[in-house]
Image: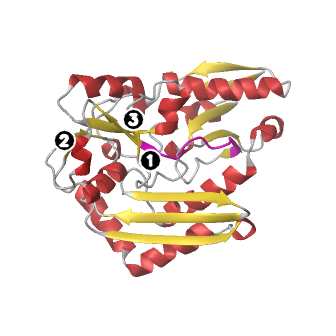
Amino acid sequence: MIKIGTRDSQLAVWQASLVKDSLAKAGISSELVFIKSDGDIDLVTPLYALGVQGVFTRTLDAALLSGKIDIAVHSMKDVPTQLAQGIVQAAVLPRASWHDVFVPKDDTAFLNDFQAYETIATSSVRRKAQWLRRFPNHTIENIRGNVNTRLRKVQENEWKGALFAAAGLERIGLLPENAIALDWMLPAPAQGAIMVVCREGDVATLASCRPLHDDLTGQCVKVERDFLQKLMGGCTAPISALALPKNGYIHFRGHVLSLDGKRIFEAEEVFNVKDSDGKGFEIAEKLIQQGAGELIREIREALG
């Protein structure tokens, strides 16, 4: 019996249940073990101010290393590029939507006026920077909590709306009909992908999870996460990356923005899937040489 560790939010449970059902199809029995994370408990402090990467994963990491659980299931965009010592990737599931969406409170006419003065909400510095680049006069309010809580806050406040990851809302059936997919907004690295991790050396569990792994998704998100790792980003910097497969090639776009969205270092490349290993590092290095590294240092100093 494999013990699956998960946070107790609706989305986290949905993702863990997907893994449980996938294991069952492979003839492997499992059970869910619910664990509260620091990221769920603190709903006020902005994510970048909590002090460490992996705010939604560290509690599960501890449970995994102590043997309380055998695997943990995460939204891959929340997982630090450097896994905790003793923990390894067991599988990456097929990717869902990578899009960010805008969920409006009511009217959306203001979106056609790029000089309008309005207020929207997001806790993501990445989404904030991209939004301000497009709407420089907008005010961005911080919003925290699980997706259910954030959707409720949209109706309770005087904002024009809030930004969400489409995949999370779609998975639990909460994507509003009036949500607008933001094709122009690049996602967080690995957004829309689900990652399963286990203890290093746990050969039996690794073998059990192998049928769940989608190799093409795994290759694409690795390019994105390598790009992020080389730039030494995380919740503390507006770093975006997207690697999409098409006819044996990967189409990559990535960028680093200043917090106000006014400065940008961006890259776009197409390469063969077979040549993808190390590409994320290479592309990030080019941006560093152009000055992106200095911008990231400035951002870290600004955020403290």
According to the image, label 1 marks what residue?
53
- The quarter in which the C terminus is drawn is bottom left
Element under label 2? strand
Indicate left or right for 191 with 66 as reference: left
Q: CA distance from mark 3 to mark 1?
A: 29 Å
- Magenta segment: 89-100
Which element type, helix, strand or loop, lies under badge 1? loop
Mark carried by residue 179 = 3
185 relative to 249 in the view: left or right:
left
Q: What residue is pinned by disc 2? A: 119
Instruction: Please state which of residues 76 and 183 is positioned toward the viewer in this rendering.
Output: 183
Q: How far is disc 2 from disc 3 in space, using C-alphas?
A: 17 Å
Residue type, label 3: Ala
Element type where label 3 sits in the image: loop
Disc number lying in front (3 or 1): 3
Label 3 or label 1, whichever comes before in sequence order: 1
Structural distance between the alpha carbons of marks 1 and 2: 28 Å
